[in-house]
Each structure stands twice: as structure tokens, then as C-alpha cells.
Amino acid sequence: MGKKTEEKNNDTIGLLTEVSWEVCNKVGGIFTVLSTKARCLKEQFGDRLVFIGPDVWTDDNPSPWFDEKKRLLKSASSKMKLPMGISIRVGRWKIPGTPIAVLVKFDGVYEHLNTVFGKMWEEFKVDSLHAYGDYNEGCAFAVASAIVIRSLVEYLEIGEAETVAHFNEWTSGMGLLYLRSVMPQAASIFTTHATSIGRSICGNGKPLYEYFENYNGDQMAYELNMEAKHSLEKRAAQYADCFTTVSDVTALECSQLLDVTPDVVTPNGFEPDFVPSSAKWKKLRTNGRNRLFEIVEALTGHRPDSEALIVATSGRNEYRNKGLDMFIDSMVALAEKNEEKEICAFILVPAWVKEPSESLLKKLSGNGGEAEYPDFATHRLNNEDSDNVFRRLSQLRAEGRIGGNRKVSIVYIPCYLDGSDGVLNIAYYDLLPAIDMTIFASYYEPWGYTPLESVAFGVPTLTTDKAGFGKWVEGISRNSLSEFGVKVIERNDNNYASAVGQIAGEVLRYAASGKEVRKMAREGAEKTASLADWSKFIGYYDQAFEIAMQKRNARMAEKNKK
């Protein structure tokens, strides 16, 4: 994966496009994958690299990550003619490397979807008959993106054989197939960051690991009403010139559930430019801790000691998959055995927020009286009766197992932390330095950006061997929180209580540790993160480009023989 491959890619790729719903649109971990990877790709390909995302923005709600530049790509946004009512805006993605980004308006594609679905069935046997939910939206965007790629190739007078088109997740899979149909000379790459059926199996409470080798993806898709997404994802993986996934954990899942083994694993790295300087880190730490302690005091009536240990979990609000259940139970177990060290635990996952807690805001402003129930959440939710985290914390509060005069407090901040949630008002990356330890007790985690982000910011983390990142750490270092900043906990379908106890014990030991141990753990975390720098991992993408072009060449040669 060295220089020779890089030079060959630079010589032969005239246009490298990458399509994702999360280009200039931060809704999940794929945004972090693409935005941190961009600088390394930009160094290789310059403005021959074009990211393509959905134009879901308005004048009243513009994308904070997009800077429109109408003259880029030879003024393609105004001069290029597009069918189906598709329009584009061209600009720069405001991330390290500032790559070109094309935002696609795809509303006009909806009325053509039935025709497209028929074409996809005839050519690739994609079953869209049982589609529901966001399936149509993803497919409309994907097809529009494929049309934009083909039109850009023609408009910029780039050879079709010089084009590599990379599509991420099932939401862009129909774009890959559509492009394969209308521009077969383009080399294609498809990356699944988590199989739709694997996530669904886990999300429905089924044991993924105990019966793993007996699962059939098609059968489970039928059982779980996932046929359309699964069919699309499976066909995109089969027909891509290069199929990739993000970890060895998910590669096994793809082989079992999609019946397609990835050509190469492309692990997710991190861009060090996202990490603040030492001076800024210390300032962020002080400000963040003060604000978190103010929130705890306003909710509970008790101001934590300045040396209290702050632990947190974050990410997508998937109660079982992301281990939110195990995080809560670990903190309860900790509260029952901890009599000395003060620990503040925060659950930082977005939910269906209604409004900030009025009594909390009054308390924070110094105008409040007694705190109202709930005294564990910063915001009220629209669905408090069905939100799993809220329900569990309410139950524990009613049982007297959390709240009151305890050494361990649990606070639910159910917001996407963009700095404007109305209570905390600190962006996630600006809050990370305030945290002493993170815990990601994942049951299903194809990679695990949250623990990688944590160690990149020098915050030691506990994760599990069911996370791709956790398995990667096990392969490169000893399993030591104090030495490498990461402790990997075994998690399977039968050891829940044991894992809860282990996490509680690790947190208690870390809380009792001295300054030297914590300093060593922070340095170990940074060292581990440095091994996952994109400059170390980008070579896997060079390999994927090479595989895609070689398979495309062989495919076209075979086609020309007929």
C-alpha cells in the first residue's frame, strides 16, 4: 500500500467521486469518516476528488459545512443540463482539505422511481416491492447522484474509464447500480459501514453472536420486514467492482448475511487537525467541567467536588446496540459499591427533544426553586414513555437506586451536541476534554468512531470486543487502560452481568488512581490514536481503488469478447 500504488492511482484516475447522505450533512458517524479522511485524499487527487451529498438545505436553514463556489467545476452548477428536475450546487466542504462538494437537489426523481425500480429489478434483481420509510428518499438521492456523476464526466470531458465512483451505505446503493447500467466503464466501490440486516437483528433484541453461523440474511430480511434495504445492499455489494467494509467484525457479518466477502477492509482513521492544541484543550477542559458540574448541581442540589471523575457515553441512540443499557446498569452497580469517590456519569445521545427543562434553566440562572421531576434529564422529551433511556432512568429513580445523596450521579443530555441545545451549549468536540473517561459498551458496533474520537482527544476509553475498533486495538496493543488508554471488555450473548461488573470495577479503579496513572493513561490514549491516523489507513483505500480498476478492466474486456 505504498507509493507505487498511490502514483498509479494519481496517474489513472481522472475523477474520484464519493457519494454519501452525510456529505455536508452531519447525521451520524459516516460524516466523521468522510470529513476526517478528506485531507489525505485531497493531497493525492486535488480537485479531481468530488464529494456528493444531498441538498436538503434552505435559505433559512443553510448547511454550516458548505461554502458555495459557483465557478468550480467549470461553472457546472449553472451550465450543466440535468434531467428529472435535478439541480446541483457546487462549493467547498468546510473541513480540513476543503475538498469540492456537490449538493444534489433530487425532489424531481420521486415521480420516476417506479420506472427506476422496474429497471433495477430487470437488470439486478433488486426487490423494491416491500419498500417503506426512508427507502424512496435514499434511492431518489442515489439515482440523482449517479446521473450527476455521468453528466460531470461528459461535461468535464473526462474519460469514463478514468472515473472511480465510491458509494457509501445502502442509501447510495441504487446509485451504484444505476451508474453501472448507464456508464459501465466507470469503476465502482461500495462500502457498507454496517449491514442493514445485522443492525436490525440486534435492534430487535435477537442474539446475533450465539447463532451467527446459522443466520441467513435473506430469511431474516423477510422475517424483519427488511427485504427492500437488504436486497439493495446485497446487490450493490455483489455488483460493485470493489466491495469494502470498515472492520474485520463487519467483514464476517457481510460474508454471512450478504453472501459477499469484502475485497478489502478499510478501517476508519482520524484527522489530528480536529484535536485542539494543548493550551486550548486545557481551557476547554476547565470550561466544560464547570458547566457539567453546574448542571449536576442544578438537577440534584449537590455541587460535585472539583476532583470528581466525569465519565460519559455518546453516539447514536440505539439502546442495546450502543450499550446504553449496559452503561446505565454499570453506573448503578458502581453506585451500590462506591462509597468514596464522587463520579458524574453523562449519557450524551440525541433523542426526540421537546424543550429544555424549565426548572433546570431557572436553577442555572439562579432564579429557581425546587427542581422538578425528572432530576436526571436536562430536557423534556416528546416520547418520555417510550424512550428507553428515559424509561430506565425513571424506573431506577422510582426504585431509589439513583438520585438522592449518592456518590454517583447519572445525567441524560438527550441532544445532538452542536453548541446550541439550550442547556449545555457546548459542541461535542469542545466537551470531550472535560471528560475523564468514556465508556462504549457496544453490543453491535461495526467500527466505533466514538472511542477513537475519545482517545484522539486524550480521553481513555472502555469499549468492547464487539466493536471493530475494539478488535483492532486487541490486535495492536496489550489490553491496558493505564498503558494504552483503551480497555476492551468481552461482551457476548451470555455474559451481560459479568461485563457490567467488569466495567464498574474498571471505573472504580480509575477513579481511585493517582495523577501519574491518569497522565499515563491519557498519553497512552494519544499513542493509540496516532496509530489510527488517516495517514496510516489511507493506503487501504489506494488498494480499493486499484482493485476496482482492475476488476472493471477485466469486466469490460469480458464484455467486449461477447
Image (cartoon, rainbow, N blue to C red):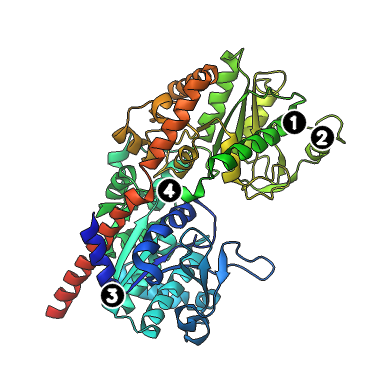
Residue tagged 4: 270
Q: Is residue 397 visible?
A: yes
Q: Position of residue 181 (x, y in %)?
A: 31, 76
Gap in Å between the C-alphas at discs 4 and 1?
35 Å
Question: Is residue 536 left or right of 128 when viewed as pictured?
Answer: left
Residue count near mark 2 (Cα–Cα under 10 Å), binned few <14, some 14–19, many ≥20: many
| Residue 382 shown left or right of residue 338 in the figure | right
Q: Residue at x 69, y 50 (%)?
A: 420
Q: Amino acid at mark 1?
A: Leu
C-alpha gap between disc 1 and disc 2: 8 Å
Mark 4 / mark 1, whichever is N-terminal = 4
Mark 2: amino acid: Lys
72 or 325, nearer to the observer: 72
Q: Residue at x 37, y 44 (%)?
A: 532
> In the picture, residue 364 is in which quadrant?
top right
Residue 463 can be seen, yes or no: no
Q: Point out the frontmost of discs 3 and 1.
A: 3
Q: Specify the label residue 363 is tagged with.
A: 2
Q: What number is the disc on residue 162?
A: 3
Residue 355, x across and y down, in percent: 74, 47
Q: Nearer the viewer, mark 3 or mark 4?
A: 4
Residue kind at label 3, given as amino acid type: Glu
Task: Measure the C-alpha gap from mark 2 to mark 4.
Answer: 39 Å
Q: Earlier in the sequence, mark 3 or mark 2?
A: 3
Kindly report the distance in space between the C-alpha atoms of the residues bearing marks 3 and 2.
62 Å
The reply to whether callout 3 and callout 1 are in contact (CB within 8 Å) is no
Numbered disc 1: secondary structure: helix
Compared to residue 189, the image places residue 368 above or below, namely: above
Compare marks 1 and 2 and give the one earlier in the sequence: 1
Q: Determine whether the residue tagged by mark 3 lies in a helix, strand or loop.
A: helix
Q: Which residue is mark 1?
A: 299
Q: Nearer the viewer, residue 215 or 76?
A: 76
